[in-house]
Image (spheres, rainbow, N blue to C red):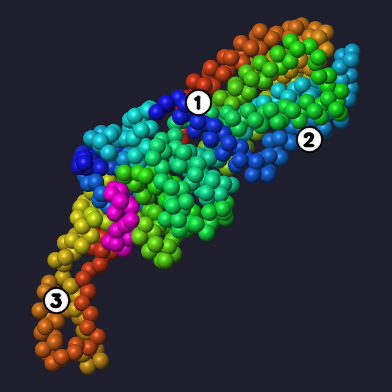
Amino acid sequence: MNLLGETLRIGLLRGSLELKQFMRQRESVVFTLLFPVILLFIFGTVFRDTIAPGVTFSQYFVAGMIASGLVNTGFQQLAITIPMERDAGTLKRLRGTPMSISSYFIGKSILVTILMILQTALLLFFGSVMFDLNLPSDPSLWLNFTWLVILGSACSTVLGIAFSVVPKSGRGASAVVSPIVIILQFFSGVFFVFTSLPIWMQQFAAIFPLKWLTQGMRSVFLPEDFATQEVAGNWELGKTALVLVLWLIIGLFISIRTFKWSRE
Amino acid sequence: MNTAPAIEVRGLVKKYSNKTAVAGIDLTVEQGEIFALLGPNGAGKTTTVEILEGYRKANSGEIKVLGFDPATKGIAGQKWRNRIGIVLQSASDAADLSVIETVSHFANYYQNPKDVDQVINDVGLTEKIDSKVHQLSGGQRRRLDVALGIIGSPELLFLDEPTTGFDPEARRSFWDLIRTLKSEGTTILLTTHYLDEAQELADRVGVINNGQLIEIAPPSTLGGRNNAPAKVMWVENGVSKELLTSNPTEEVIKLNQHFNGQIPELQVLRPNLEEIYLKMIGEVK
């Protein structure tokens, strides 16, 4: 038996099963996919001020929401649903089968990837139709967009799995995870222009991936000369990649070392 | 055919921070046997079984399940899991999938799965095959758990309190299923709270209390049950009478002569398994 092939095959099967289950839970579909779109409508409609020549806050906000979307569908979703699966006995049951842990993670990654693609597409669509988000025509910007999404979502996924050991129970998971994500959004330049935040907040946010992801998304969707308005006066894409890769490694390490199959 | 025991345990000890859950258990379960583990809550039953299933690590002891140490990790552990089936005490997962979706999916995990429709039929869920798991009753859900435990054609099946929440009819048909599995050569380790279940199914019963196996015997001789005094009851002149005797046959013959024929409302009672069991776990306190 080809073990790698088998792990991959089961992983794909798990992915389709995860997706099927997710789509059948209407409330989670609405919460995960539509909530960011709703936020986009609210903020985009209320804050129409111009923050720099040719740049409105709603454009700034859309870029931030695309970055946040990766955190919502990866980190938030997994850090909440994995503890619930742990409480329900799903994980313990799986642990007792020949299925390998890698197949489980592959399945989760497939679910998260598809959700991210859907969500990003929704945000791009509404952002460009309703809030003047400029979809770039330069292919190199789309290339940047692609690696930002891939690296950002990988990072978000492994950190979600890593964080899943923190909530004590499935019922309490949402209360532990959601505030962290919201605070991080406030600190990372999603709801406010990052440079208008107090310095300590900026420095705190710079430890975590979301700040770098939002900045990266702005490099794709805002005019090139807006870079001068950023903290460093440029987009810092190299540094962004470095921070994301570091968090990816940390997340992977913690996930593998601490993952818990049952509650005790 | 390999005739090594399915389960071999010597000196199993498991301690949690301040208390010893399992205090040195020796246990051998032969291939093809149904072995029932009985014991009050907190006696160390679940801990023992979960060590055998590979969920927990023992502090010390020699443990071989199908020839393997259940704590084996990685690929060898995966291969070993292909040969066992586990029905856990409680699971409430996969509520948004249908019965057939769930069982078919689990069949993919195993190298040699049984026929999905056949298994669903065997556990009596054919009528519910397209129902979502959350629409099932407690007993039906338990039967789905069993289906997931046996889908991989296990050589050894662990059943942790499998019939909790079953109505009497469902329990009967479940027992038939277990007997069928046994006739196919499956070894079964069962924990249960129901003494009648152990009596119906088990070849041997092990009673565990305070982390120790206090006796292993067939249900009919457990606790010296076969030699224990029997109670002979009858009615004489409208008054109930009873006596305890180690030789009930002799007493009945005497009564037969005394009444010169029919003994009114005659009953001969051996202590049932439950009485024996309660006495056993009471003694060790």
Going by the numbered disc 3, the residue's amino acid type is Pro
Which residue is pictured at 81% across the width and 19% down the height? A135
Specify whether B217 is left or right of B154: left
Q: Which residue is mark 3?
A: B248
x, y percentage for residue B283? 22, 57
Q: Which residue is mark 1?
A: A255
Where does the magenta region start and end? Answer: B179-201
Which residue is pictured at 67% across the width and 26% down the height? A70
**How far is mark 1 from mark 3, CA to CA?**
67 Å
Q: Is residue B8 visible?
A: yes
Q: Nearer the viewer, residue B230 or A67?
A: A67
Q: Quadrant of residue B167?
A: bottom left
Going by the numbered disc 1, the residue's amino acid type is Ser
**How far is mark 2 from mark 1, CA to CA?**
32 Å
**How far is mark 3 from mark 2, CA to CA?**
82 Å
Asked if B102 appears above or below A153 in the picture, the reply is below
Chain under disc 3: B
